[in-house]
Image (spheres, rainbow, N blue to C red):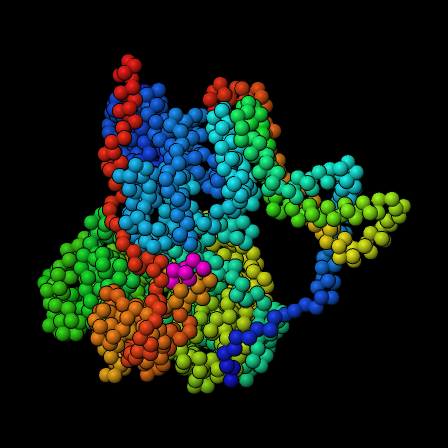
């Protein structure tokens, strides 16, 4: 199958060249490589190391052709006008066979008993296509053991053909820079860092290497002994079996024929299903390989629109939770101090009668609904429909209230659409990327790889503003550390400087933007001096920022919780958008604002109406025309007043007017701020329904707990951070009696007399598309397989990868500069002298309900830890492992310390992956963004006491954070070519011909 | 006041309930597959008479050992054709999951042992006896297993039959063209 990837075949390019292939005239495009030109044509040539997502690696020497009489590698040779290409002369074939022979010297063909023999093995397929029957250089074992140390994948040097794909992917796609090939040994091999076992290296277990490996050398452990009918065989029997296959004198023919047959049989029991990852807003999609309920591997595809071949540790290896024994499999009903397993009928009847009773007694406004940004668009739509049309309340919100609503607000104010301006590809292309308050390489790992790659290879400039020196900061050309919560001030000062110095994009301002005068007037106070004082940044740095931004032809700003989770979160988001407007960075390729959505469906949960003041498509509840549209469609009356948001719901319980809550797919009792306050509210509810995979902290307060099915067990759509709607297909049957959320909501609505007739999520999408203008052309047919749509989607199915190309969605098509002022961050008082920064870790998702179910992840990161600066450690006498208590006015946590220079001074970092004594939200307050009520998680201070000086280091030595990456570009093939025993196959052929000739 | 709780009282079925559920399931399946089941019983009978069942039992019951011996025997310089044929055979053997088969065969063995004890009896089994005997958990289990086996056996497998089209003539032609497919 060496011809399976046919990409970049000059699509869209002018066929401006005339060349000859084996004597026949053909046209070609400038810039095209010989390999791409030939691929898919009758003259196609073999290749092994080339991968369309990695480009030419030039290690395998199997794609050799003759161009104008010279032997060259087709993968790295671009065509020129008049070229004469020879792909099939005996000489060329001979050279190619030499390349393949050298591969087989490194790789034993025991296909039938190989777990990688699933039709996609490129070594197998190339041997077959090249009709190689014998091997002139016999296979020889390498003097290295298999490295099984990593929990997720293993490396078998003996099977490694040294093609370098894994190295290329690690160095230049994922850009963790762990893998290299040591070309200098007698038998080269892949090494990790400075040649340490995989598990002791800087490897982040993203899985790129095993994804791109063309054979069984780098393989997911889930595949081992599982895929083949005979691969689980005893090692002792296996060896003679391999010897037999080698001993067959007729050559590889029959071996390959049998293994092909066996590979075809495997398809009977191995199912490959496309799904969309549920771990963050990047929206990676991939095939999941399953055998029964067992997940063999996650297989990303080149066609995946957001991620291509990329994944992170969670998406590639973090699915054990699906088969966890802790999953809820039956509805639970509270009886005194125990939950009793019940039938769905019982649970539904209880919910229907309680909802009805409370509605009759206290009115519809006493009921509240919280939708999940982990659930599908269809489920968000149904949840808001349940609240609005069946119960009669707008008290519906979703958990993006905890993260991204301020960003949406900032964009609504200025540019009119609450979503990323373009695609990840635009970020990749941009000349300057600014990352503010985002630990991108851990929170949005795959998106970060695109920035890291462009920065490493394509001269992209990178500016990072953060408190903490995380990986993106380490890589940045300019890393600034403004005081916590002061981003609005430096952003405004830089904007003012740009306007004052005439560095703004005046044409853009004149033609596309309103409100400049008022905006300028409000900026007056943001002088450099003022900004220096508030942010702690020097005037020179501010000027450098202004100049760099205004001089760059394209700028993208990426931001996340470091901006939004503040009392002025919406205003800072607005300031970012203002700066982009002033510099003309909207409405074209490679520019714009990118609030990085945290959960897989943060975007979609709000898009599809789970908001107290907005219907699907962000149409306002207060708008009578919109309300009428829904009233007509649903045949009910909808209340005109916006409902309560999450924050107001909790307050409403305390105040006594909220009596019931139905919450799905979010451990709000851990992830909301000031959780002691939230728990106290739960205790006061008359009736509480929680729908989740596990008996979460939140569910423990419920009266009825409903077992839901995760993404792998249902169909639907998610919308990623690029506004990209993607379909997920059902990989597994729902576990036990659990059900997809949409079915549960439908059934509850029907118990309340709704008469809903949805048989499949596509029915729900069809209804939503008819009502919500942004999704007018969305349909399941248009989203089949790896197809996707970026909203707004017109009725004819035309989508919008780049927003604002034809103006902004306001009446005069002009954007609006929106004046904002700085809100000083909350001060807890002098005694709380430690600033507690908080957020995610790469390997755990949120509180860890799902990711702690993975043994591998838990072995590498068993619990949370408190990052302490060397200065603070020295000052307080803290060591790695010291147990401390942090206390804020709202609660306290107990946690072990880790000393690191990622933080400085009295700034500490507490990752959020704990739902016990170290849960960050025991410390956070109920202060929130003044415009959206998003909790100000990042404005948290505490005092620190040492509880136990000596303790175990909370971060095991097998964690990647201790590793020593070895950056280099690609696989360094020149070192291979410089080896004494290396002869370019073309030269070898020439030499031989001369000798005989 | 609803305090957080973690205790879950699992729904437990009494042994009697579970049994009656299982029985109903088997009965349903029996009725749905009446003809196939009766035929299977007949086949099993023939297989037993011809001594095929004990043979299979020996082969698969000791699957790993047999495989090991076979493989080691083959791992000697032999003539190519024999090896090729053996390899083809192995490919087919690979379809059988020995681990899965072992318990099945042990059960058949036990069945045969029982038949051996009663081989001289003149007892006749009526239709009613047959249905009644389903209440016997051992028979019930056996019938359940058999039905699964039948289901698998009836599956469409033709597309796997790669060897069917592989005639010596074709192969001769192929090798002339150096084609391996």
Q: Nearer the viewer, residue B161 or A958?
A: A958
Residue A320 location, x and y as percent?
A: 48, 58
Q: Is residue A187 above or below residue A132?
A: below
Please check the rendered image and state whether residue A855 is part of the magenta-colored stretch, yes or no: yes
Q: Position of residue A781 (x, y in %)?
A: 48, 50
Residue located farthest toward the top when viewing the structure as drawn: A997
| Side of A217 relative to A906 (left or right) | right
Seen in the picture, residue A678 relative to B124 is either above or below; the reply is below
From the image, which quarter does the N terminus of chain A lie in? top left
Does residue B130 sit above or below A100 in this rendering? below
In-front residue for pair A848/A141: A141
- Quarter-of-image position of residue A70: top left
Horizontal side, residue B149 vs residue A906: left or right: right
Q: Is residue A878 visible?
A: yes
Q: Residue at the location (49% across, 35% down)?
A: A242
The span shown in magenta is A854-861
Question: Toward which corner of the image does residue A202 lie, by quadrant?
Answer: bottom left
Quadrant occupied by the C terminus of chain A = top left
Task: In this rendered view, identify the residue nearer to me: B62 or A984.
Answer: B62
Identity of the residue drawn at 35% across and 82% down: A890
Q: Residue at x 30, y 48 (%)?
A: A195
Instruction: Say if residue A593 shows up in the picture.
Output: no
């Amino acid at each position: 199958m060496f011809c399976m990837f046919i990409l970049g075949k000059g699509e869209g390019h002018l066929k401006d060249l005339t060349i000859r292939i084996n004597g026949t005239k053909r046209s070609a495009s400038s810039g095209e490589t010989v390999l791409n030109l030939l691929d898919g044509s009758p003259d196609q040539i073999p290749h092994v190391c080339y991968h369309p997502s990695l480009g030419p690696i030039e290690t395998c020497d199997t794609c050799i052709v003759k161009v104008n009489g010279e032997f060259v590698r087709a993968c790295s040779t671009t065509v020129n006008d008049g070229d004469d290409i020879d792909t099939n002369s005996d000489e060329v074939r001979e050279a190619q066979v030499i390349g393949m022979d050298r591969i087989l010297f490194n790789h034993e063909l025991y296909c039938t008993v190989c777990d990688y023999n699933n039709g996609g093995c490129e070594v197998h397929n190339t041997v077959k296509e090249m009709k190689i029957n014998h091997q002139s250089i016999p296979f020889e074992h390498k003097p290295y053991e298999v490295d099984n140390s990593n929990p997720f994948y293993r490396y078998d040097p003996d099977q490694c053909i040294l093609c370098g794909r894994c190295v290329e992917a690690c160095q230049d796609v994922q850009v963790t820079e762990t893998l290299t090939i040591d070309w200098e040994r007698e038998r080269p091999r892949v090494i990790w860092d400075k040649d340490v076992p995989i598990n002791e290296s800087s490897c982040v277990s993203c899985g790129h290497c095993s994804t791109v490996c063309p054979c069984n050398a780098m393989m997911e452990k889930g595949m081992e002994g599982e895929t083949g009918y005979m691969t689980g065989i005893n090692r002792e029997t296996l060896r003679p079996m391999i010897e037999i296959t080698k001993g067959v004198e007729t050559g590889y023919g029959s071996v390959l024929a049998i293994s092909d047959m066996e590979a075809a049989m495997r398809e009977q029991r191995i199912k490959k299903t496309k799904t969309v990852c549920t771990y963050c807003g990047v929206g990676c999609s991939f095939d999941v390989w399953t055998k029964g309920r067992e997940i063999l591997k996650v297989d990303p595809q080149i066609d995946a629109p957001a991620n291509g071949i990329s994944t992170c540790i969670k998406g590639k290896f973090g699915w054990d939770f699906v088969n966890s024994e802790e999953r809820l499999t039956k509805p639970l009903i509270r009886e005194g101090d125990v939950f009793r397993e019940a039938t769905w009928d019982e649970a539904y009847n209880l919910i229907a009668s309680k909802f009805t009773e409370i509605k009759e007694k206290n009115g519809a406004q006493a009921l509240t609904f919280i939708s999940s940004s982990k659930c599908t668009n269809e489920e968000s739509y149904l949840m808001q429909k349940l609240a609005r049309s069946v119960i009669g309340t707008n008290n519906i919100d979703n958990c993006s209230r905890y993260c991204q609503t301020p960003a949406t607000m900032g964009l609504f104010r200025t540019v009119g659409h609450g979503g990323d301006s373009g695609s990840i590809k635009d970020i990749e292309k941009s000349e300057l990327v600014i990352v503010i308050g985002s630990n991108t390489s851990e929170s949005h790992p795959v998106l970060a790889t695109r920035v890291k790659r462009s920065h490493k290879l394509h001269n992209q400039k990178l500016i990072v503003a953060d408190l903490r020196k995380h990986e993106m900061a380490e890589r940045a050309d300019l890393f600034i550390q403004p005081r916590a919560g002061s981003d609005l001030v430096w952003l405004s000062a830089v904007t003012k400087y740009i306007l004052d110095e005439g560095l703004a994009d005046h044409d853009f301002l004149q033609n596309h933007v309103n409100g400049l005068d008022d905006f300028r007037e409000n900026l007056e106070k943001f002088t450099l001096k003022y900004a220096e004082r508030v942010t702690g940044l020097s005037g020179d740095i501010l000027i450098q920022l202004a100049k760099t931004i205004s001089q760059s032809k394209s700028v993208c700003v990426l931001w996340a919780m470091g901006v939004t989770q503040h009392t002025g979160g919406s205003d800072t988001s607005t300031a970012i958008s203002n700066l982009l407007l002033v510099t003309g960075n909207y409405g074209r390729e490679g520019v714009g604002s990118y609030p990085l959505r945290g959960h897989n469906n943060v975007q979609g949960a709000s898009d599809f109406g789970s908001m107290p003041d907005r219907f699907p498509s962000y149409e306002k509840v207060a708008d009578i025309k919109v309300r009428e549209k829904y009233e007509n469609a649903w045949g009910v009356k909808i209340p005109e007043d916006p409902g309560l948001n999450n924050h107001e719901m909790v307050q409403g319980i305390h105040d006594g007017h909220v009596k019931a809550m139905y919450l799905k797919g979010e451990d709000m009792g851990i992830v909301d701020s000031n959780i002691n306050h939230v728990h106290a509210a739960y205790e006061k509810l008359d009736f509480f329904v929680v729908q989740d995979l596990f008996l979460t902290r939140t569910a423990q307060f419920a009266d009825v707990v409903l077992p839901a099915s995760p993404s792998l067990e249902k169909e639907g759509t998610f919308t990623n951070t690029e506004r990209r709607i993607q379909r997920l297909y059902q990989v597994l049957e729902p576990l036990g009696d659990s059900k997809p959320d949409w079915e549960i909501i439908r059934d509850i609505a029907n118990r309340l007399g709704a008469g809903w007739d949805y048989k499949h999520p596509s029915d729900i999408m069809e209804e939503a598309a008819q009502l919500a203008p942004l999704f007018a052309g969305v349909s399941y047919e248009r989203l089949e397989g790896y197809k996707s749509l970026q909203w707004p989607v017109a009725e004819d199915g035309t989508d919008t990868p780049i927003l604002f190309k034809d103006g902004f969605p306001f009446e005069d098509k002009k954007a609006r500069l929106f004046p904002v002022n700085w809100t000083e961050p909350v001060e807890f008082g002098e005694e709380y002298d430690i600033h507690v920064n908080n957020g995610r870790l790469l390997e755990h998702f949120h509180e860890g309900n799902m990711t702690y179910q993975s043994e591998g992840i838990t072995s590498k990161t068993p619990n949370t830890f408190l990052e302490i600066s060397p200065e603070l450690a020295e000052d307080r006498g803290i060591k790695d492992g010291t147990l401390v208590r942090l206390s804020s006015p709202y609660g306290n946590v107990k946690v072990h310390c880790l000393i690191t220079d990622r933080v400085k001074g009295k700034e500490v970092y507490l990752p959020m992956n704990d739902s016990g004594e170290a849960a960050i939200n025991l410390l956070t307050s109920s202060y929130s963004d003044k415009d959206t009520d998003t909790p100000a998680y990042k404005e948290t201070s505490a005092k620190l006491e040492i509880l136990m000086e000596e303790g175990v280091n909370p971060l095991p030595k097998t964690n990647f954070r201790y590793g020593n990456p070895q950056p280099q570009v690609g696989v360094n093939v020149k070192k291979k070519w410089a080896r004494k025993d290396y002869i370019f196959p073309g030269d070898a052929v020439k030499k031989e011909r001369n000798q005989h000739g | 006041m609803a305090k957080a709780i973690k205790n879950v009282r699992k729904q437990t079925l009494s042994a009697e309930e579970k049994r009656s559920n299982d029985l109903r399931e088997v009965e349903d399946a029996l009725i749905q597959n009446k003809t196939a089941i009766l035929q299977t019983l007949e086949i099993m009978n023939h297989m037993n008479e011809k001594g095929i069942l004990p043979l299979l039992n020996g082969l698969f019951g000791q699957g790993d050992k047999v495989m090991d011996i076979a493989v080691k025997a083959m791992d000697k310089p032999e003539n190519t054709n024999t090896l090729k044929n053996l390899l083809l055979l192995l490919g087919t053997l690979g379809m059988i999951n020995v681990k899965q088969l072992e318990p099945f065969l042990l059960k058949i063995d036990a069945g045969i042992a029982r038949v051996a004890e009663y081989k001289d009896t003149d007892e006749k089994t009526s239709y009613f006896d047959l249905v009644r005997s389903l209440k016997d958990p051992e028979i019930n289990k056996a019938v359940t297993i058999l039905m699964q086996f039948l289901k698998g056996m009836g599956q469409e497998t033709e597309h796997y039959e790669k060897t069917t089209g592989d005639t010596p003539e074709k192969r001769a032609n192929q090798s002339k063209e150096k084609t391996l497919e």
